[in-house]
Amino acid sequence: MLLLYFYQMNMKKKSCISFIFIALFGLATQAQSKKWTLEECVNYAVQNNISIKQTELDSKTAMIDKKGAIGNFLPSVNANASHSWNIGLNQDITTGLLRNQTSQFTSAGASVGIDIYKGLQNQNTLRKANLSIIAAKYQLLKMREDVALNVANAFLQILFNKENLKVQQEQKAFNEKQYSRSEELVKAGSIPRGDLLDIKATVASNNQTVIAADNALLISKLSLAQLLQLKDFENFDVIDNTSVKDENNILAQTPTAIYDKAKESRTELKIAQTNLEIAEKNVAIAKGGFQPAVQGFYNFNTRVSYADVISVSNGVVVTSAAPPFWTQFSDNKGQSFGAQLSIPIFNGFSARNNVERSKVSLEKSKIALEQQDLDLQRNVYTAFTDAKGALNAHESSIAALESRQESYNYAKEKYAVGLMNSFDFNQSQTLLSNAQSEVIRTKYDYIFKIKILEFYFGIPIIKN
């Protein structure tokens, strides 16, 4: 019975271990077989990209600057305290007489100051801080848009390399079959041995092409994995479900309509406009340096002596203990309050230079806004022309592929009956393969350029 018990326990442990192993293996297999969609790639990059995280920190800095601007409206409160030991000849702070004695003194005070008027600099600083927060948010949005566009480009590059690798592999497999068939024809004496050597060279060239295409695919996966900040990029892969479609019919729009829409929504214009408003506030802050400033203040101080009070009465030295701490604290306290007016008269041209410097920055911001508008107009018209050209190129490549396919079919028939040599037949195969690759290239070039055009029209890279 005891042996049976241990046997059952051992079987249970093995079953448990087997279950855990199968579960872990299933999870690993699932992780390795996961394929990312474009939406997943963009969302993951937006959450994990280092540049976006740095820009988010800039937004936090802008919030801290706003707290500082609000703090300018609040009073400044400071307290101070000191304690000292005086040994030897020193002045009694109570009687004012010099005495050779050891004494201790404690002093304490507090001061409050508040800006009553400062040339509206505090108000304008707060307005500038609010604008800086808006600018930081726009910068963060712009960074996210740029990352999304880069991810989409890298994603489409992987799809292009996948299809191109597939074409090259199919071409290699076909040539290998053709080589085997040619070997039989050489043995039968139907074709010369030179044709077999030509096909063998073509197969070797196909091997190199397949290796190059496979390396290009691996590098494109690595590039996207780095954009996503993924550490395990060896098993990274994407879903192959992208088709050539202008779903939003963006090419039906005119370049002018797309440009007008872009002026309303493009983040770079909003950033430039906000920077212009910030520059205007900087001018107002600098001009406030010419105006007088009024500050209210309140001061409180007191002191306590720990030395015994020594006096002479009828020629007799009389020593009396110092009053209690809180009695001295109350009796020796003093207060002052009022207002201070400061009028700038001459300060080495610093105020004037600050105004001039801020005006120069304002002019730069105006020029930057104008340049950003011109760049946007040029980019929109260029993107529209590129998308039109990419569509035409893709349609032309499809027509060329159909012609190359017919030409190859005809060459195949001629080669089969011995009316075409292997060199010319291989040339026909190469032209067909190039036409297939060109269709793939123009396909993804068109998709990406449509994405850019939609981007300017306010359509996001992915739809949430």
Image (tube, helix red, strand yellow):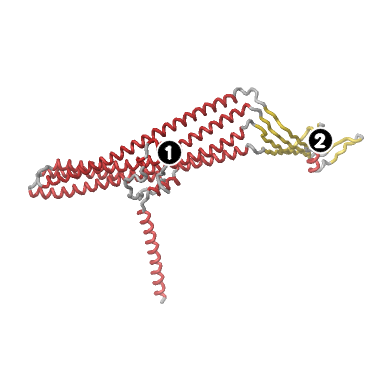
Q: Give percent across and percent down for residue 271.
A: 48, 36
Q: Which residue is mark 2?
A: 94
Single out the residue that lies furthest toward the right: 314
Determine whether the residue tagged by mark 1 lies in a helix, strand or loop.
Answer: helix
Residue sitting nearer the eye, 430 or 438: 438
* Residue 338: percent from left, percent from top: 73, 33
| Mark found first going from the N terminus, 1 or 2 | 2
Residue located 12% across and 43% down the image? 195
Give the residue at mark 1.
Answer: 261
Q: Which one is nearer the viewer's eye here, 1 or 276?
A: 276
Q: Secondary structure at mark 2?
A: loop
Q: Quadrant of residue 376?
A: top left
Give how far across and how far down residue 238 sits, in percent: 35, 49
Task: Please name the residue shown 42% across and 46% down the image.
Answer: 45
User: Mark 1: few, some, or many residues within 10 Å (few <14, many ≥20)?
Assistant: some
Residue depicted at 16% across the width and 48% down the height: 178
| Occupied quadrant, residue 432 | top left
Residue type beneath disc 2: Thr
Q: Is residue 377 visible?
A: yes
